[in-house]
Image (cartoon, rainbow, N blue to C red):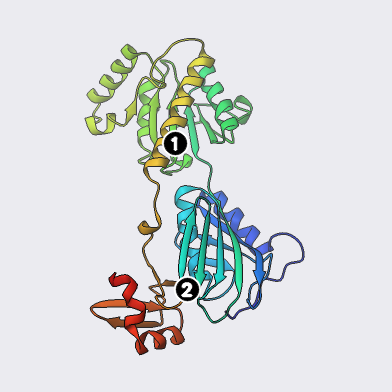
Amino acid sequence: MGGAALQRSHGIDDRLLKLLADNAAAGTPCTLATVIRTEPPTSAHPGDQAVITADGVLVGWIGGSCSEPLVRRESRLAIADGLPRLVRIRPDTQVNETRQPGELTVATTCPSGGALDIFVDPQMPKPVLVVIGGSPAARTLIQLGAVVGFRTIALHPGATAEDFPAAERVLGDLSLVAEAGTSSDSWVVVATMGHYDEEALTSALSLPEADVALVASNRRAAAVLGNLRAGGLSDTELARVRAPAGGRRSGSQEEIALQALAEVAGLRRERIAAERVTPADVTGFAVDPVCGMTVDVAAAMHIVEHGGDVYYFCSGGCAEQFRADPQRFTAAKAG
């Protein structure tokens, strides 16, 4: 496990801090992996850190060939479910991988013999809540959305930052809606209350990945959608509109805003649960049948074909052990 550890005196390395800030500004998910415990011999030390992006690029240092592919694989999972996890690498006489909620322990026969505990913490971008309108409901949605943890964007013709002090960003023209971004975790609520409803919805639907909701009565919503259909929008486009937002329109403007935001939060949680992935869903990695360590298939330098299957190894030593007695390492698989 060669390489030089990050030299840090206090806190996170400046290079990693900038990378984390850049990813946050761009809405790009990543993980921050931190070595929290070691037992020598290891090339990593407590406090060593790395940032891993969703496409598997690692910047920093959390150990060499034994730990890096494993942490990159676990980072993919952490980004997918948004949950942190502790990765433990332990020397043992037998290969084994044990997964519990929030923790993965890998027993390895790797000759390096060291032990590592690495905490993988997902750095997820905030979900985006775009609220169109200048109504009291719109202003309340911005305030509540900020409290719940959304990155809030207010959109209303002629609006300034002073009009929506709770918003992270204020856009004063419907033509600027594209600046709200096209993240799949974007949610738009149109709370124009009869003022420029059709124009607001047309702008909202120009964000291809955003969920779009309209605050309106059933009758008003039907009329607005009918006008948009007559204006040339297709049924497929209009089917994206949830109306009335929150399931019903009743109570004060503030209560209406609360109902609309509660629906957004609930639907978002349902989507996260439906998209949750398992270790089997993470492709591009294999397990070395000799030592049990994770191997990046695309970068693997030691590959052996046997019995119609392809095996990947973390080192030439493991590959040679496999060639000398493949039956020993394939018996478990065959069983």
Q: Residue at x 51, y 15 (%)?
A: 255
Above or below, 213 against 255 in this view is below
Q: Position of residue 28 (x, y in %)?
A: 50, 52
Query: In the rendered image, which quarter is residue 191 located in?
Result: top left
Kind of residue at badge 2:
Gln
Residue sitting nearer the eye, 67 or 93 = 93
Residue identifier under label 1: 269
The percent coordinates of residue 193 (x first, y second) are 44, 16
Compared with residue 14, is residue 208 higher up or lower down, i.e. above or below?
A: above
- Residue occupying image coordinates x 61% and y 79%: 3
Which residue is farthest top?
Answer: 251
Disc 2 secondary structure class: loop
Residue 322 is labelled as: none
In the picture shown, does residue 243 fall above or below 105?
above
Quarter holding residue 246: top left
**131 to 288, vertically: above or below:** above
Secondary structure under tag 1 reads helix
Q: Earlier in the sequence, mark 2 or mark 1?
A: 2
Say whether residue 284 is visible: yes
Q: What residue is shown with label 2?
A: 94
In this rendering, position of residue 107 left or right of residue 332: right
Q: Amino acid at mark 1?
A: Arg
The CA distance from mark 2 to mark 1 is 40 Å
Q: Where, quadrant-wise, is the C terminus in this rendering?
A: bottom left
User: Where the N terminus falls, by quadrant?
Assistant: bottom right
Any part of residue 135 in sight: no
Residue 239 lies, in percent from the top left, at: 27, 30
**Rendering coords of residue 153 (x, y %):** 53, 34
The answer to the question of whether label 2 and label 1 lie on touching residues, with beta carbons closer than 8 A, is: no
